Amino acid sequence: MAQVHSGIKESSSTNDPSESSNTEADLVARLPTREGWSTPLTLHNQCWLRSHMLGKFMAVRDNFRPRGDDIILATHPKSGTTWLKALAFSIFNRSRCSLDNDNHPLLTTTPQKVVPFIGAVGGDLDYLETLPSPRLLSTHLPLSLLPPAVSTLGCRVVYLCREPKDAFVSRWHFENKIGKGGPIGLEDAFDMFCQGCSAFGPFWEHYLQYWKESSARPREVLFLRYEELVSDPLEVVRKLASFLGVPLTQEEEDGGVAQQVVSFCSFDSLRNLDANKAGGVERAGGKVFIQFSSLFRKGKVGDWANHMSKEMAEKMDRLVEDKFKGSGLVF
């Protein structure tokens, strides 16, 4: 079964913080960098990455060692990452972490910690090597920045995407919550998002890379939509259980296990847990503080209509139609 752990382990790639800082500063200086979001972004291999994380993310493709039985949860930011982590962890570990157990890890630890991000704080590459197989991991990186062995070894990947207008509005709110340099205007954020300049963007390239991978490896790459989770979470739980290699038994179906998972991992249930209401992590040398509570806003489909003008929505729709034309991926 997947690992059960709750601690965040800091990166051990260097014993000298100043050396690491200088190296990343050198990298940023050599590549296109833009301000505008809560932290500066640097363009690497056609993907915008947070500048303070550039070195760690660049190292993933060369130094992360996938295993054939790895399960990777991949998302573009603000597309239901926390929800997917909670669902996958609960489903995959249910044989030894009963959902009615008062000591279940998700009752005391945020989903962001129990499923570590590849290459990020809490999921540095040395630490990932210590985890037993099969590993349940996560990433915001596009497929092009992961090692080719993810595909050649047949690693299973669950990709969750979200309607771009809702993803953008959620991103805008999130960036304004975590940044300490003042709020980002909606129109400025919208322009950058449409230009492809957002963390792990352009969003269309991110979606398309995993969409094409799901077509090439349909038995090993499960492509989901956030809207599916909202409209039919029971079916998604069953689909995930089967894909993860731990399908629900008839006894579990009769016992309502799928309903139990949906209830346990619901947006309101997760948001109201103490582990997700208190605490957080500091980033970018103290310029950003991510409160765990900021990972839960509304989770509603169509909330973009409460923020974006008709003109903005039409522009985004035209962009999406153009970028995904001919791919078979539609919104």
Image (tube, rainbow, N blue to C red):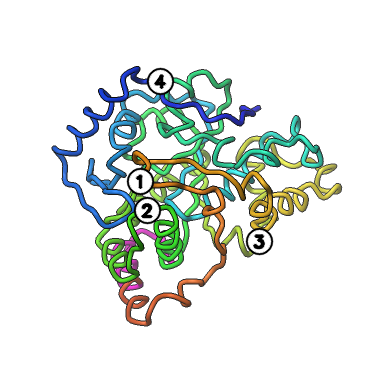
Asked if residue 14 lies in the magenta stretch, the reply is no
Foreground mark, 4 or 3, reads 4
State the CA–CA distance, disc 2 to disc 1: 6 Å
Amino acid type of the residue tagged 1 in the rendering: Lys
Q: Which residues are magenta?
A: 317-331
Q: Residue at x 54, y 68 (%)?
A: 301
**Circle on res. 12:** 4
Q: Which residue is mark 1?
A: 287
4 or 3: tag closer to the N-terminus: 4
Number of numbered callouts drawn: 4
Q: Amino acid at mark 4?
A: Ser
Residue carrying label 3: 232
Using residue 101 as the reference point, say whether residue 122 is left or right of it: left
Q: Which label belongs to residue 180?
A: 2
Q: Are marks 2 and 1 in contact (CB under 8 Å)?
A: yes
Q: Amino acid at mark 2?
A: Lys
298 versus 11 height, above or below: below
Q: Earlier in the sequence, mark 4 or mark 1?
A: 4
Quadrant assignment, res 187: bottom left
Of labels 3 and 2, the one closer to you: 2
Task: Say what secondary structure mark 2 lies in.
Answer: loop
Q: CA distance from mark 4 to mark 1?
A: 22 Å
The amino acid beneath tag 3 is Asp
Label 2: few (<14), some or many (≥20) within 10 Å?
some
Please indicate, yes or no, whether residue 33 appears anywhere in the rendered image: yes
User: Quick check: is 321 in the magenta stretch?
Assistant: yes
Marks 2/4 in contact by CB < 8 Å: the verdict is no
